[in-house]
Image (tube, helix red, strand yellow):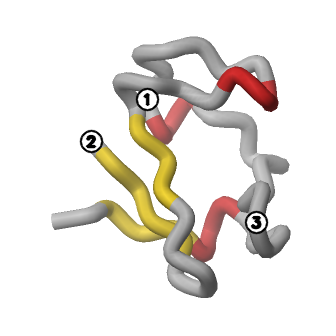
Amino acid sequence: MIYVCELCGWEYNEEAGFADKDIAPGTLWEDVPEDFECPLCGASKEKFEKDE
């Protein structure tokens, strides 16, 4: 599943994870730390929506 930042469009892909923040490939969005911020604009995790 892919989650997209509402403010800038940056995408978090569960299959890929996010190595820059030590989030392993396969990490579900619900398991990403609550203090995660968009690496491009700094938006909080609440500003991300599932890409349908």
Secondary structure of the residue carrying tag 3 is: loop
Q: Position of residue 3 (x, y in %)?
A: 41, 56
Which residue is label 2 attached to? 1
Mark nearer the viewer, 3 or 1: 3
Q: Of label 3 and label 1, which has the lower sequence position?
A: 1
Give the residue type that dot 1 points to.
Leu
State the residue at coordinates (78%, 29%).
Answer: 20
Determine whether, in the image, residue 35 is placed left or right of residue 38: right
Looking at this rendering, what residue extends furthest in the bottom direction?
A: 7
Q: Callout 1: 10 Å neighbours few (<14), some, many (20+)?
A: some
Image quadrant assignment for residue 4: bottom left
Picture residue at 77% right of the left edge, 48% below the top:
36
Query: Could you say where residue 14 lies in the image, as x and y percent from the top left?
Result: 40, 32
User: In the rendered view, would you say 46 is above or below 8?
Assistant: above
Q: Please say if 17 is above or below 32.
A: above
User: Disc 2 vs disc 1: which is toward the camera?
Assistant: 2
Q: Residue at x 41, y 39 (%)?
A: 13
Foreground label between 2 and 3: 3
Give the distance between the C-alpha atoms of the residues marked 2 and 3, in whole angstroms: 20 Å
Q: Which residue is mark 3?
A: 40
Screen quadrant of the C terminus:
bottom left
* Dot 2 amino acid type: Met
Alpha-carbon span between mark 2 and mark 1: 8 Å
Q: Nearer the viewer, residue 33 or 38?
A: 38
Residue 28 badge: 1
